[in-house]
Amino acid sequence: MLSSYSAEDKLLLAVDCIIFGFGDEDLKILLVKRDFEPEKGKWSLIGGFLKKEETLDKAASRVLYSLTGIHNIYMEALSAFDAVDRDPGERTISIAYYALINIEDHNHEFSNGYSAKWFSVKDAPSLIFDHDQMVHAAINRLRYRASTKPIGFELLPEKFTMRQLQKLYESIWDTSLDKRNFINKFRSLDILVKLDEKDKESSRKGSWLYQFDQEKYDRKVSEGFMFKI
Amino acid sequence: MLSSYSAEDKLLLAVDCIIFGFGDEDLKILLVKRDFEPEKGKWSLIGGFLKKEETLDKAASRVLYSLTGIHNIYMEALSAFDAVDRDPGERTISIAYYALINIEDHNHEFSNGYSAKWFSVKDAPSLIFDHDQMVHAAINRLRYRASTKPIGFELLPEKFTMRQLQKLYESIWDTSLDKRNFINKFRSLDILVKLDEKDKESSRKGSWLYQFDQEKYDRKVSEGFMFKI
DNA sequence: TCAAAAGTGTTCACCGTACACCCATGG
DNA sequence: CCATGGGTGTACGGTGAACACTTTTGA
């Protein structure tokens, strides 16, 4: 089919990934040292350009893999960043992506040969271009998501304590929560399994380990259950 | 500054606008007959290509104005549509925008010389490319927005009846609501002014007209008041 | 024995929801 | 006088939020 689009402008399209992790009772993001001009050597989100025959999702996965070795994670698009002068190199529109991952699961993937590094969200360095804005938008989205559906699946190790779960929500919302209300809330959701195992690292008494029950969760979702948290 | 981006692919970027209106107790969208190939002559969203030195917001406004004569309305970006073969003409990524407008306020603007036409959301024709998906996404966003903040400001005429307001929410959520609860809810929000005027069109008794109180609304927003509806 | 974290229930206020009858008017 | 839409209030159950003490055990 003949195209009548020949007179139109073409531009560069990029993807930038905000990867969230959780460890040491703290919400973290993964950053890389940019290795090309402009702004070479500065901390930046994990980003790269879209290729012509590729979807944005694919580009995000490819870019993430090439800069960190991480693969097979679910990323979700946030929004477009499009200020005319956002990239001093050349007019580029960027689509921000974000994902939640379990740090330990993926640590081995980028331990060598990559410049990727985890930073606590609280004291991350300032980033190039409009990447700080992107992180900000991603945190807002994460906050919303956390109030809509349980997010522990992705960010926590398979077995976790109630304390870890609570600290996760506290660091996402940057607030402190009442332990009893928090636990009651999650109990009423009925998607956790209490294991017969204790974690003795964090206290003398030891605290029970839990797992998410994916099946129960899926069943509830399919029954239209709402996970307002 | 020297750019090192020269090896990267460039693509076409488009914007497509979903314009919502409300009239005859029905939610409507504005469509145009596409006047270039491919798919010339078919119904489509209001769309066009981004120019290199333009933001997406500007492009959306420009495109909307050029195809309908409508200007000065607030549009919000939805998300990117990026399937590789979504546009058979050439690889194009499109950013969907949506806006809420009051049909009467803008009717004069596109009455002549434009092919734009309002369709009830319920019986709109099927659209080119992935535009039906875009409309679907826009409705979802609209539903969310309507539950988060009052939307009557944009979609209704300046003076409106409670019935109109309720029908608006009913058509957005495709549900029916209890009249008493609806009115109580809005009363408790305390952002409407009851006028000393009745609308006698729709009934013998006549129904009171209301107006939004923008000032009260702004004050409440700035006090952090939540408008969960 | 004590420090440090784990674990556990109840009460109350508020909000969402269900629900039915009288009113005013023009034809 | 009657058909049509307009207008109004209450009661109940569920949910979110506040709140404090006991238990365990390694050092």
Image (cartoon, coloured by chain):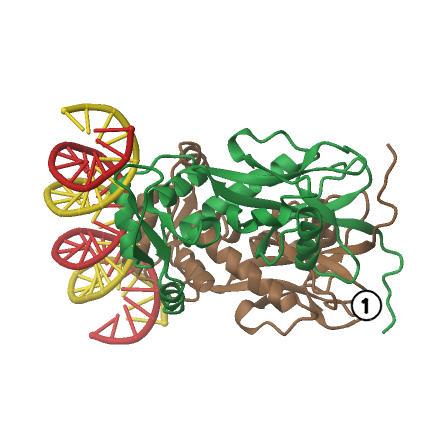
Chain colours: A brown, B green, C red, D yellow
From the viewer's perspective, tell me whether residue A19 is left or right of residue A35: left
Taking the image as shown, residue D8 lies to the left or right of residue B214, namely left
Q: Quadrant of the N terminus of chain A?
A: top right
B166 vs A70, nearest the viewer: B166
Q: Is residue B5 above or below residue A52?
A: below
Q: Position of residue B99 (x, y in %)?
A: 56, 50
Residue B14: in sight, yes or no? yes
Who's the residue at 37% across and 56% down the image? B211
How many numbered discs, if any? Answer: 1
User: As displayed, is residue B201 above or below residue A183?
Assistant: above
Residue with the mark numbered 1: A89
Determine the secondary structure under disc 1.
loop
Q: Nearer the viewer, residue A200 or A222?
A: A222
Give the residue displayed 76% in from the left and 32% down from the top.
B39
* Res. A150 visible in picture: no
Image-based side of A207 in relation to A56, left or right: left
How far across and down, in percent of the image, does residue B178 sit?
Answer: 28, 38
Residue at (39%, 52%) from the top-left corner? B159
| Front one among A76 and A210 | A76
**Circle 1: residue type:** Gly
Q: Position of residue B103 (x, y in %)?
A: 52, 46
Q: Chain of mark 1?
A: A
